Amino acid sequence: MSEHALDISLTVNGERVHERVEARKTLVDFLREDLALTGSHVGCEHGVCGACTVRVNGEIVRGCLMLAVQCDGATVETIEGLSDSGEIADLQAAFEQRNALQCGYCTPGMIAAAQDLLKRGGVPSRDEIREHLSGNYCRCTGYHAIVDAVEAVAQARAGAKP
Amino acid sequence: MKITDDSPPVLTALDRPNSYIGRSVPRPNLARLTQGRGLYVSDVTLPRMAHVAFVRSPHAHARIAGIAADAAKKSPGVIAVVTGAELAEVMTPWIGVLTHLKGLKSAAQSPIAVDVACWQGEAVAAVVARTRAEAEDACELVEVSYEPLPAVTDPETALDAKTPVIHASLGDNLCFERKLDVGAVDKAFAEADAVVETTFLFGRHTGVTTEPRAVVADWNAGEQRMTVYHGTQAPHMMQNLFAKHLGLAEQQVRVLTKDVGGSFGIKVHTYADEMATVALSKLLKRPVKFVADRIESFVTDIHARDHRVKAKIGVKSDGTITAFEIDDLTGIGPYSVYPRTSGIEANQVVNLVGGPYTCPNYRAQARVVFTNKNVMCQYRAVGHPLAVAVTEGLVEQAAAKIGMDPLEIRRRNLFPDDGYPCASAAGLKFEKLSHHEALAHLDALMNYAGLRAEQSRLRSQGIYRGIGFASFIEVTNPSAAFYGVGGARITSQDGATVKLDAQGALIVATGITEQGQGAEAVVAQCVATSFGVSIDRVRVITGDTDNTPYGGGTWASRAAGIGGEAAWQAGKALRGNVLAVAGAMLQAKPEELDIRNGVVVDKANGTERLPLDELARVAYFRPDTLPPGFQAELMATRHYVPRAWPFAFTNGIQASYLEVDTDTGFVKLLKHWCVEDCGTIINPQLVDEQIRGGVVQGIGAALFEQCLYDERGQMLNGNMADYLVPMAAEMPDIECDHVVSPTADSELGAKGAGEAGTAGAPACVMNAINDALRPLGAKALTDMPFTPGKILRALGKV
């Protein structure tokens, strides 16, 4: 397979990374297998479930629908980086308080998607929250608690009632 | 520091200082998961670990004439290509039967098919390589010669004489049959003023756990020990099975279960590919990892609910139900799944139909037949969604037929709240249920009268909304009556060990397992309360057969009721031991002391006497200062199993409010309510979230989910783009409320809550759709899932 491998350089969670990767390797497999960033999860491998949601150049993407080689020169942020930067600390606390996760497998992707909505500002309606998260599959919670948690953070960030 | 505002009012014996019973305590260690720092089996890597991928049969039924593996063996990174015959040298086959399901039969199943593949997706060869990608590359190079055999795909004709028999050794395609005839059914139908007879169809569906099944097996030839990192609900059960079929003693097998990405009953069974992975590790003397991909999951994760139920109800014009009758037929694939069998679901349907009602006349027949589709077995709320949909569908159709309000017909037939203990026509024994109180709560919670008025007003504007209900009972806290008596080594008891560490904090090891339900939180709450420390001083260990008490794990809504009670008792036992030490140190009577907020106090007035860290320091490092002959015992274990009742039945009622677009057939869910009674509520938030998650899983069955097969036994929609699951945008807010009737079988009084939502949701969504369409003259829909196409057909629009 080495003839199908390419060298890539990118920034992952603020660290410079240089790796040789197979051309066919997806971004999420690269993150999990080559960088041992196992917080991004593999759920369906065909872009439906959202468990592999990560941020590339500021936009959320499906880590299973993007190839690692497409990320040459890119800035990638995973749940580990978003956690350590403190950017989503309030969302994480709200998920924990509201029990907006059970098995936790969808949670990194769900939080990344929720943050993508919340960083636009304002307080989205429950329907808008549901719509924005509609690409992230959760089998455990039934979504109600997740919507509650995201709504509470939106209100808190907007300075409204907690 | 007791918080009273979220505590149910009934907790007297449990109402100690430091009480966490009835409080919505956040689960410990959730930050690990919100930060992506959990450890799922799919995250596990070990030195020298290889990856296995399976060559799977593309045929539903075929003889394996030959396997040519030379090209695959030369493929880059390949370590071994192994066939079923080769793996049979390492692992014995199994047969999924239970002796208490009389007559249930099945054939021997191997980890990899030998000679004949019996469903599309059954593994016929394994390729082990350095990486999963290399293993998959080589799978494409394995040439299997198949001789296709006729596939049995229609349960209705599976028993016909001209239908081929899948396993010749069994004689026919009948796995299990049960008949029941109680009371005077024919007379009761004859005396009915109205009879409703219909057929309910349930879509075969599956769990779709977010993390697929995963296992890493590590045979250490030097230790002669097998360590299995396994995403399972029942580590001790799997320890027994791995050992048994590898010819090892149980002490040679350790099963480790850390984070599990969803289970729902999917991960409590024996899977051929997981057994093969464990056998391959022993064969190759190195760690081997298998993680199912999503396509594999759809054709190998157990399916469930594929039933056809012909059903009949008789009712008097005053609403009295005179009789129920059902004929259930289900096709469970080519094997009864090991070790819980595939007869339980139909058995539950027979047990549960009519369960909430006093009607004494009931006739049932259930037949379980073999087919050449993926296997079916127990999935969340086993049999309940079917039985509840049949019962509640009949009850609401009967109510409509006699012109009675659907809540009123229930009031006239539900077991009275003051009539316990009692038994159902099928023989289920109820200790204490609360159907009428739950119904009254629901009536008020949803403002039923107001919704009816709104429904009526909107109908005049051409907007068709429906209100549907489902009363239900749920089997929880199973005793040995479920599996143990049938010969399966699936324990119904569970244990907890509590240890005081050298700084006065607690470590609890429990046999129940955590897949997100909150089992660790419940155990911590129970121990903190019965021992007397703040909950942040309690750490819980689960999922390790080397280091936890022997236990059943988490399934059948048993973790809180059984594992919680064991933890409660273990905490109490350790408190007694610790107070004995304190008594010796303080020259006081232990019975006059207590532990509150981690401090030994005078029981009478709460005066602080001794902090636990000081007690631990003396007991561990200066035992020489304790009285001669006194030995501190700072670890205690207790076990619990329900004995007074075979099952702790719970009850509840759900309601759905929805709108049907009569032009497109789309259903918009507006709101869902559930009032249920799981006895003592240890953690209200966790109970409500179990209900909500369960309801949405049930809604999936009602509206979206179905494994579609063609007549050749090919699954047509085995991926997440074509198999629809509930997503956030389509789901409603779900309001929960509770009635509390504790079981007297345990001190805690907790029953299970994990399956109530799934049990009732499909029925009440079905009833709500039919309620919406009734004024339009549509024939009642009874064929789940209720897709837009089916709704438009019922309306005569397509």
Image (cartoon, coloured by chain):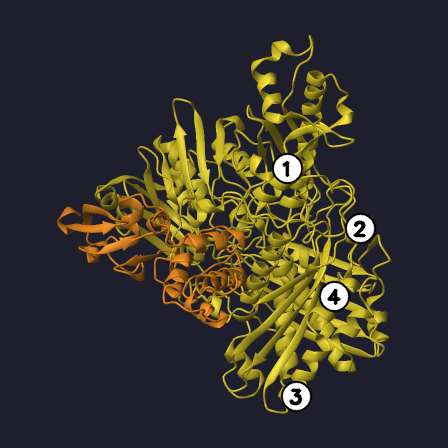
N-terminal of the two: label 2 or label 4?
2
N-terminal of the two: label 1 or label 3?
3
- Provide the chain ID for the residue under circle 3: B
User: In the picture, which chain is yellow?
Assistant: B
Q: Which residue is mark 2?
A: B431
Secondary structure type for disc 4: helix
* Closer to viewer: mark 1 or mark 3: 1
Q: Which residue is mark 1?
A: B528
- Provide the chain ID for the residue under circle 1: B
Residue B776's disc is none
Secondary structure type for disc 2: loop
**Mark 3 to mark 4 CA distance (whole Å):** 25 Å
**Mark 2 to mark 3 CA distance (whole Å):** 43 Å
**Mark 1 to mark 3 CA distance (whole Å):** 53 Å
Q: Which residue is mark 3?
A: B457
- Work out which quarter of the rendered image holds the N terminus of chain B and state it: top right
Type of the residue with mark 3 = Arg
Crowd band around label 3 with a 10 angstrom C-alpha radius: few (<14), some (14–19), many (20+) = few
Q: Is residue B322 above or below residue B788?
A: above
Q: Which residue is mark 4?
A: B441
**Mark 2 to mark 4 CA distance (whole Å):** 21 Å
Left or right placement of residue B304 versus residue B194 in this view: left
Left or right placement of residue B749 versus residue A35 in this view: right
Q: Looking at the image, can residue B455 be seen? A: yes
* Closer to viewer: mark 2 or mark 3: 3
